[in-house]
Amino acid sequence: MTILKSDPGKQLSLLRETDPWYILRKHYRPILKGLLILLVSRVCAMTIPVSTKYLLDNVILAGNLNKLPLLAVVSAILVAIQIMTSVTANTFFATLGENGVMELRTLLWMHICHLPLEFHDKGKVGAILSRIMNDLDGVRWLIGPGFADVAGASASNIIVIILMAKIGFSLTAVALGFLAVFCLMLWFNLKKSKSMHLDYNALRAQIMGRLAESLAGVRVTKAYCAEQTEVTTLRARFVRLSASAVKITNVHSWMGGQAIAIFGIANIVFFWMGAHQISTKAISIGSFVLFMTVANTLGGSTFQLVASTKQINEAVAALQRMREILEIEREDNNPLRTVAVPEIRGELCFDNVSFEYQTGQKVLDRMSFTTAPGTVTAIVGSSGSGKTTVTNLAAGFYRPTAGKIYIDGVDLETIVLGSYRKNLGLVLQDSFLFDGTIQENIAFSRPSTTLEEVKRASRIAYVDEFVDQFEDGYNSLIGERGVRLSAGQRQRVAVARAVLAQPRILILDEATSNLDSESEAVIQQALAVVMKGITAIVVAHRLSTIRQADQILVMEKGRIIERGTHESLFAARGRYFELYKRQSLQVEEISEENQVV
């Protein structure tokens, strides 16, 4: 066994990745490059206003029409440069934004994959998907086109203010005064709308979660004619979401209205002051036309900043919601987990283990047992007795509320889970298959494996018996959750996947309880081969399948009330005997009914 050093700074590093300022600093080199291109574009954007002043003062009013061709050529060149740099900058920042969102989505998904099972049990699929896909769309704007818009508008404002100051100090001072009033208004409304965006995103995530549930449960909805109930439930949430969106829109509409009022009054003041200054020869007509033109440019750029505030708030809110997930500690981030176990013998020991999903409600109560390496331990009992919880704890999906679990004498809470789970195989009652090919699903436990190794595992699990029925063989697509396969075929693929993992501990949680007798017999034959020489923990519904187990644990209400072999338990005439006889009678009744039919 190998002792590893824990990394307490990993969580802080993840949180740092969602700091908006850190994101911008991280990409500062490409951002500076893009800003340089953007600055050239914005400077060239002043070509027409400046050319207009020159045209009026130095060409038309001065009677120098011979300068007109040169002015036209220079202006055309600068406009062409503006077009090229504008397109280049927009493409550059769009690419930067997409790459940034890709990095954040990968970071968030990696973290979610490493979160404890409690998170996935409590979280809704739709809400998680909303945070990964919808929420982070706003971040694309923050470091992509939106950043270019804000930076470009800010650059334009600086250039405009410099031009205005050269024209006249008094007019510029008035313009800056109105701009200061506008900035105060902007700050106030930004503060007001930030909480609204957080509420809106939370509501949208809730709706995504409920929609995912409704789609998954559509058969139940139709079976009970509950379509209208679902519509009513979701419509109420849609109404709340719509009302939240309207509030945000109203805030931004008022911001636009206030901006129109501020800049409208500013233009009236400029007309008044400009007329007086032209009449006194303080400025020329061309200078005043330039001032009014760039003043409107200042208004347009500032309006662009106003429009950007919504996206800024959405992006910051999305990052904040992302941080909420990243603040949840990963299951492999426990500083106690320092022992790596590349290989194990397969001895599993529960020592007075108790467990609670909810505080005060014990599912397991001081449970103790040991599985010797290479033996089969079967767990039976009534529904709700805690059988599946034992397998979840054995796989390290949960941590005991009290007591200890040992693997080859080492406390499981000190073992690096990744190294331990590489020694595990898992076949569930309804084993999950991915939307892909048969080969991909079998090779999921060992992605680097060869086709020959996949075929070898398939022969053991009897997958090869039905693969030839598909036109593309192992490359046949099986659909979402393996919908194109029968229940028995799905279980054979799951068994082949476990075989390929070459586990030292195999966990079977009612792996054949939902199958017909023919499919069950095939799976049992495959499992008999797989379990040779490894430790197996079998949660069994049909007791006839575990008669050869080395030990059988009978559970009730989270406790082991009986243990032994099939023969010893049967002879004891206790709870196991009752369960076995009851199942035998049910089988006989079913057989008699079939004969009558």
Image (spheres, rainbow, N blue to C red):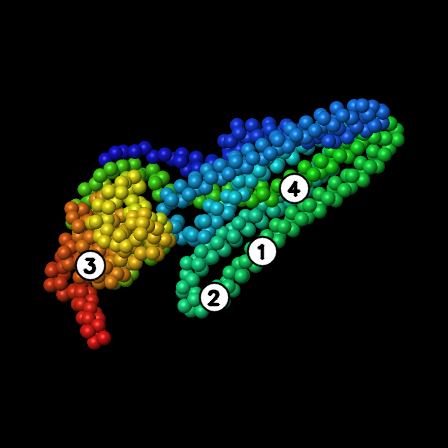
Residue drawn at (80%, 31%) of the image: 288
**Which labelled disc corresponds to residue 242?**
1
Q: Work out how far the residue at label 3 is from the one at label 4, CA to CA, in angstroms.
A: 69 Å
* Label 2 Cα crowd, 10 Å radius (few <14 / some 14-19 / many 20+): some
Residue labelled with disc 3: 521
Residue that mark 2 sits on: 227
* Cα distance between the residues tagged 3 and 2: 40 Å
Query: Mark 3 or mark 2, which has the lower sequence index?
Result: 2
Give the number of the disc on residue 314: none
Check disc 1 and give the amino acid type. Answer: Ser
Of mark 4 and mark 2, the one earlier in the sequence is: 2
Q: How many marks?
A: 4
For disc 1, the neighbor class at 10 Å (few under 14, some 14 to 19, many from 20) is some
Please state which of the two labelled residues, at mark 3 or mark 2, is closer to the viewer.
3
Secondary-structure class at tag 2: helix
* Three-letter amino acid code of the residue under disc 2: Glu
Do tag 4 and tag 1 residues touch (Cβ < 8 Å)?
Answer: no
Q: Earlier in the sequence, mark 1 or mark 2?
A: 2
